[in-house]
Image (cartoon, rainbow, N blue to C red):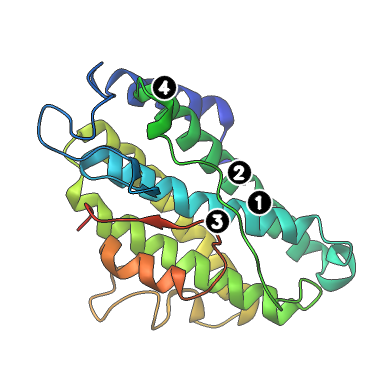
Amino acid sequence: RNFLKLSGLALAGTGLLIAGCSDDDDNNDNSNGVHNPGVVNGVFDLGGGDLGILTYAYALEQLEADFYTRVVNSNTFGSTFSMDEQEALADLYKHEVIHREFFKAALTGAVSNPNMVLPALEFDYGSLNFGSRNQVLATAKTLEDTGVAAYNGAGRYLSDANFLLIAGKIVSVEARHASAIRDLIDPNTSAFAGMGAVDANGLDLAKKPSEIIPAVAGLNIIQTPFTYNYLP
């Protein structure tokens, strides 16, 4: 529960800021020919290269943070979940908000043009009943499993070792989230590391951005359009 501390992430973020882009970020393409995040044909594109991967992670963290914010602030939170479950979900909420704010601060500090930072996304959960334990946990399971696979799949495309280190730290926490949610759904079973969470080799699943983003879009939760033309 105390694994993540805001001060620790702030220190880690310093490395990201130092390793950020050059002052030549006002162009769509940087000096290496990698497309930077920004508006393309009226729609924000996540960009490519390391900044694109970090912006991609920021989009996913915005979704998770918003979801858990709504969960813990629901007027039925106390009546829907036991005290232990409330404590666990509150921890996940705090973690995801820290992740979101960390990426926002890191990306804002890493670029010279504020238009390169993904804006705050809008969300709509449709008919999701936040007063239903089963619906909330099922949605949390989908988001956490997706998040773990996203980080694992994107890590190979990071060229900066500092970025890879940070991503590795965050995905280890996301994996704890995924196992915790699975255990709440099926306590005292092997579901916390069951099929769908790990592969036949006992490893967490890994999926490329081009696999993750359409799957997330299919949930119809994210209402703000964006493209990912330069991500693998």
Mark 3 or mark 4, which is nearer the start of the sequence? 3
Q: Which mark is residue 109?
A: 4
Q: Position of residue 99 (x, y in %)?
A: 51, 42
In this orientation, does residue 173 appear? no
Q: Is residue 113 above or below residue 169?
A: above
Numbered disc in front, either 2 or 3: 3
Quarter of the image holding residue 232? Answer: bottom left
Q: Does label 4 or label 2 sit earlier along the sequence?
A: 2
Residue 230's mark? none
Label 4 residue SS: helix
What amino acid type should be assigned to the residue bearing mark 4? Answer: Gly
- Distance CA(mark 2)–CA(mark 3): 10 Å
Mark number for residue 93?
A: 1
Q: What is the three-letter code of the residue carrying label 3?
A: Leu
Q: Is residue 61 above or below residue 206?
A: above
Report the residue marked by disc 3.
Answer: 63
Seen in the image, is 215 located left or right of residue 140?
A: left
| 96 with respect to 226 (left or right) | right
Residue lying furthest front in this view? 41
Disc 3 packing (10 Å; few <14; some 14–19; many ≥20): many
Q: Are marks 2 and 3 in contact (CB under 8 Å)?
A: no
- Decide: few, some or many residues near mark 1? Use Cα within 10 Å; few <14, some 14-19, many ≥20: many
**Front residue of this view, candidates 68 and 210:** 210
Tell me how far mark 1 sits from mark 4, CA to CA: 24 Å
Q: Which residue is depicted at the point 23% across and 28% down?
A: 27
Residue type at numbered disc 1: Tyr
Residue 28 picture quarter: top left
Is residue 103 in view from this perspective?
yes
